[in-house]
Image (spheres, rainbow, N blue to C red):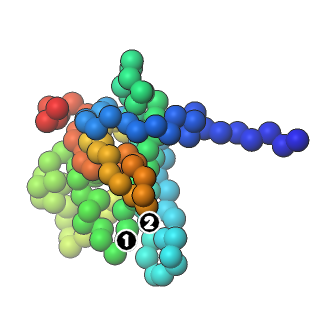
C-alpha cells in the first residue's frame, strides 16, 4: 500500500475564526490559472501563528492574478513593512521590481474572513498589515 503524506493543515480543514492573525510567508509560487488562458497566478503560502487557537499552524494560500497585479500591493507593503506610498516614492522608473523570493520568511498580519464558495464555507485571506502594525482587531 502506498503511504499518503497529508499536510497537518489539510487535516484541520474546519473554518478558521474570522479575524486578524500573525503569520509567516513560507513560499511564493507561480501557477497557471485553472481555466487556462494567458495569465498567471502568484501564490504566497502563509502559515498562521495563533497559539492556543484552531488557527495555529494553519497554512493558507492567496491568489494574485497577473491581469490584476495592483491587488498584490497591500501584501507587498505588509511584507516589506513600509507604507505603499513610501514604496512608490522609493521606486525609480515606471515599474516596481518585486522579487518574490525576498518575502519568503517574512512575517506579517493577515485578515481572515469566511465566505461561501461553491456551496460551502471557506476561510480566505482578505487583508494584510505589517507584522508590528496595530491591526484593527
**Above or below: residue 123 compared with residue 95:** above
Q: Which mark is residue 27?
A: none
Measured from the top left, where is residue 100 in percent x and y?
Answer: 41, 54
Q: Quadrant of residue 113?
A: top left
**Above or below: residue 122 compared with residue 96:** above
Q: Quadrant of residue 56?
A: top left
Report crowding for label 1: few under 14, some 14 to 19, many 20 or more residues within 10 A (C-alpha): some
The residue closer to the viewer here, 70 or 104, is 70
Measured from the top left, where is residue 58 in percent x and y?
Answer: 46, 35
Task: Name the residue that disc number 2 marks.
Answer: 41
Say left or right for 8 vs 72. Answer: right
Q: Residue at x 20, y 73 (%)?
A: 94
At mark 2, the secondary structure is strand
At mark 1, the secondary structure is helix
**Quarter containing the N terminus:** top right
Task: Name the residue that disc number 1 marks.
Answer: 66
Do labels 1 and 2 touch, CB within 8 Å? yes
Single out the residue that lies furthest toward the right: 1
Q: Residue at x 30, y 68 (%)?
A: 69
Q: Quadrant of residue 78?
A: top left
Amino acid at each position: 500500500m502506498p503511504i499518503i503524506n497529508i499536510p497537518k493543515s489539510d487535516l484541520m480543514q474546519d473554518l478558521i475564526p474570522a479575524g486578524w492573525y500573525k503569520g509567516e510567508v513560507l513560499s511564493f509560487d507561480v501557477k497557471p490559472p485553472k481555466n487556462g488562458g494567458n495569465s498567471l497566478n502568484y501564490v504566497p503560502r502563509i502559515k498562521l501563528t495563533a497559539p492556543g487557537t484552531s488557527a495555529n499552524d494553519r497554512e493558507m494560500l492567496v491568489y494574485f492574478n497577473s491581469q490584476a497585479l495592483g491587488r498584490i500591493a497591500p501584501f507587498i507593503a505588509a511584507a516589506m513593512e513600509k507604507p505603499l506610498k513610501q514604496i512608490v516614492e522609493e521606486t525609480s522608473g515606471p515599474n516596481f521590481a518585486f522579487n518574490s523570493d525576498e518575502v519568503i520568511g517574512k512575517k506579517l498580519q493577515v485578515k481572515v474572513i469566511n465566505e461561501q464558495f461553491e456551496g460551502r464555507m471557506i476561510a480566505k485571506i482578505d487583508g494584510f498589515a505589517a507584522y508590528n502594525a496595530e491591526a484593527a482587531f
